[in-house]
Image (cartoon, grey):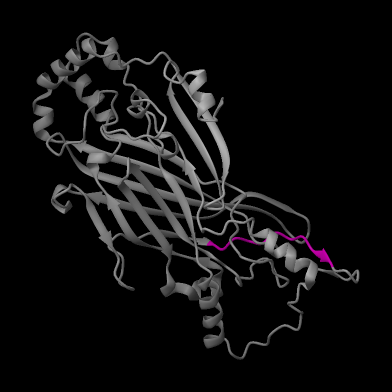
Amino acid sequence: MRKTLLTLLCCVMAGSVASQTRSFTTFIYNDDSISTEIQAYCNAFYPAVTRGSRSGDLGPMMKDAAVNAAKGIGAGYVSAFVDLGVKAVTGLMERRERIRSEWESTVASENMYLTHVNSISNLKDFYSTPSVYGPMDPKGMRFNGIGCLRKNGDDTVFYISLHINRQKINRIVEHSKFELVLDTLIISPYYSNLPNSSFDTAFSFEQRQNYMMNIDFTLTSSWMTQATMIQDNVELGRFSICIPVRENSLDSNGFLRYVRKGDEESRYPVMGESFIVPRSYSGFRESNDAYHDLWGTGEYQISLNIKESCTLTKAYKDNWRKNRRARKHAQKSTNIIQDGWQTVTSQQWDEITKSWVITILQAPADVLSDDLIDKLHLKEE
């Protein structure tokens, strides 16, 4: 299995750490034109709807508050780094003799890898400004999709980009829901987390087949209603996408690359939908002491579950004796049992991207020295 080093740490981490850590980066797309398209749809299909008489002027004091509500996240994405440490298969170290079924059960257990990646919560706003009209007012909506990136040094070895389906803007207006569509995909089984083994074994189509990546995105939010009822960590929607990768679909470099052209139907459909984020009620008082209802800019969180899986080839299973001997030899020459794992974390503001970055690194305890932790400005858990 090929391992990569966390992007923020690559300049200072030792090679032994690089061989035992993995990282993903999640980010959120923003696009102010989403709100413009929603308004254009309303103007085209609901021209006779009577507009309310409530004033939309927030007043000088609240205009400043609206600017502050954006929290300075102007770059349009937020990153989260999560370690994907290798899971040791200690059962292989404890057995001296195994029958074929035991070998196959062990090897089959290496055919799945689960990853949970969280974006940073309570820092991203779904809308650019507060609203005086209500909690589901889509005006100012800027959320425009989700992406996930994994790099090996300077090379991109995995990238997926999903945006709001502009062909279904009407669902935002009529149902307060949106759908996503996949635009870009870069993926390679050779840089995957499979086989999920403590042996440094790369993915091979001679041994494994039917590589599959399943990704689930879940959007949650917390808000307060006008009746001062708190809605905490409510799931608003869920999206899932299934990406099968076969050897004949890869280019000469071992990658599957897909870019959606124009408004064509995506080759990889995204299942599911989500409500737009409800605005939290707050209210405000102007300088003349007049009080007005106000609904906020919509805080939310997106989490990702990534599942990689594959199956064994018949040729690999038929050659189980040779593989079993090779594993036993590797066990004698390599110490694959870790004395314990240590986790260190940091959170810092990135002025360039205007976003918070959380770093979580897990590695063997004997690798992460106190001096290294201090140099990386990390904190031991």
Q: Residue at x 11, y 19 (%)?
A: 321
Q: Residue at x 15, y 47 (%)?
A: 247
* Residue 281 lies in the magenta-colored region: yes
- The quarter of the picture where the N terminus appears is top left
- Taking depth in this image into account, of 353 and 80 the one nearest to the observer is 353
Stretch in magenta: 275-285
- Taking depth in this image into account, of 112 and 363 the one nearest to the observer is 363
Which residue sits furthest bottom?
A: 48
Give the x, y percent position of residue 345.
53, 31
Residue 160: name its quadrant: bottom left
Give the x, y percent position of residue 145.
46, 60
* Residue 85 lies in the magenta-colored region: no
Q: Residue at x 42, y 30 (%)?
A: 12
Residue 7: name its quadrant: top left
Relative height, residue 285 to residue 9 (above, below):
below
Asked if residue 2 lies left or right of residue 21, the reply is left
Asked if residue 130 lies left or right of residue 289, the reply is left
Q: Residue at x 9, y 27 (%)?
A: 318
Give the x, y percent position of residue 259.
28, 63
